[in-house]
Amino acid sequence: MARTGRLVLTVPAYAVLAAVAAVAALTLFVLSLNLPLAGFALTADLAVGDRVTLVLGQFPFVGPAFGPLQATLLVAVAALTGVDVAMAAYHFREHGVTIREGGTGAAGVVLGTLGAGCAACGSAILVGLLSLVGVSTSLLWLPLDGLEFALGALVVLVLSVFWLADGMRGGEINGCPVDVRPRV
Amino acid sequence: MNRRRFLGSAALAGATTLAGCAGSGGGGDGSDGEPTGTPIDEHPAAADLDAQPMLGETTDTVIVAFEDPSCTLCRRFEENTYPRIVSDLVEPGEASFVYRGYPIIYPWGEPASAILEATYAADADAFWALKDRYYAAQGDFSTENVYEASRSFLDTETEVDAEAVVTAARDGEYDDAVALDVSAGEALNIGQTPEFYLFADGVYRTVVRGAQGYDVFATALGL
């Protein structure tokens, strides 16, 4: 799986796609948590520098909104999303796979995006989720204060990358054969 | 279970989670809350503002904070951003900071909010001290010990009659004051803490969610 990912990223166009997708995912994650402020930053009568300050302040490791572990997980989820998007795009374009056949990878990306968006929220955001299903807002049963969502997103993305790599087995990526070990 | 079915089920769970996220935010952007430009005395976040704990003199530029003493994100805000808001905005008279208790995270946040209200009724300085204590020692508080631990702090670190304050809170005398803040938050559809409503020149500007940095607050307020 890791080798397949590395092979895809050795193609410059897909490396750029992975980077763009990762940055886009991270931007989506953090701005979606503060949509009114994002809207204010983009539409209010502000200097360009102020707009940049408001937007950049939302990102992990720039502002204090995320703790170190939360920020690391969020960046990891975004990076893995980038790799997943690049691998899915490669699979679709270079191997002639249809959306239907590659649906698992696409679903994984979507799911990862959903999960990662919530992963950024921390414990507080779970209140909304819990109230939706009529559960007490107590979070005592979540030992990681909501980081469970980030970890869940990571698991799903790893599964998606794994299945994409599995689907690419037997083909070639950037001129190199993909591992052809028999399925277990 | 095949992987397509697995991902389908997982996607459903993810969508539910997203719904939780999407549904948890408060209003304030003009789409689901009060629009930018609403006068402060007409905005739900500032309902009964005179009765709320406020640091600072100005009522034109105000940060109204909805916080839960048990909320870890609130603690991060209190540790990283609040001190600079006080030193750089409140003390120079640039802005005021209003605290509203919105106990929705851990169970001990509810009695803690009532104790805060009771403390504020007795002495404003003691209120701010107790509020700081809750965040500084958040891990030390629980549903089981919140009354006793609060009483002990108030008794040793403030001038208030700690026993009377805690007894009043325990007897429910300040539940209505907590309910007032909760009602204000519910009117704004707040589903997470901390959440801050920013007013400048007497009108609403925007809402800030989470433990944002000082620069975000100062910039959004135009300071």
Image (cartoon, coloured by chain):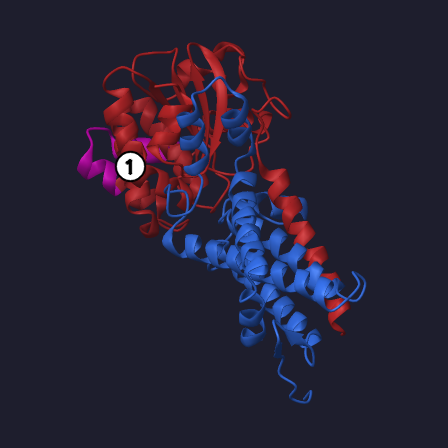
Chain colours: A blue, B red
Total marks shown come to 1
What residue is at 34 percent from the left and 52 percent from the top?
A: B139
| Residue B158 lies within the magenta run | yes
- Quarter occupied by residue A100: bottom right
> Which chain does the numbered disc 1 sit on?
B
Q: Residue A41 or B156: which is nearer the viewer? A: A41
Locate residue A67, reporting x and y percent.
38, 50
Locate residue B79, reporting x and y percent.
30, 40
How packed mark 1 is, by other alpha carbons closer than 10 Å (few <14, some 14-19, many 20 or more), is some
Against A176, residue B85 (above or below) is: above
Q: Residue B178 or B18: which is nearer the viewer? A: B18
Q: Residue A28 or B163: which is nearer the viewer? A: A28
Start and end of the magenta stretch? B152-168
Against A176, residue B74 (above or below) is: above
Locate residue B124, reporting x and y percent.
28, 23
Image quadrant in which the N terminus of chain A is located: bottom right
Q: Indicate left or right for B156 with A26 as reference.
A: left
- Quarter occupied by residue B1: bottom right
**Which residue is disc 1 drawn over?**
B132
Overall secondary structure of the magenta section: helix
Q: Amino acid at mark 1?
A: Asp
- Quarter occupied by residue B23: top right
What residue is at 61 percent from the left and 64 percent from the top?
A: A156
| Residue A13 lies within the magenta run | no
Dot 1 lies on which element? Answer: helix
Image quadrant in which the C terminus of chain A is located: bottom right
What residue is at 42 percent from the left and 24 percent from the top?
A: B220
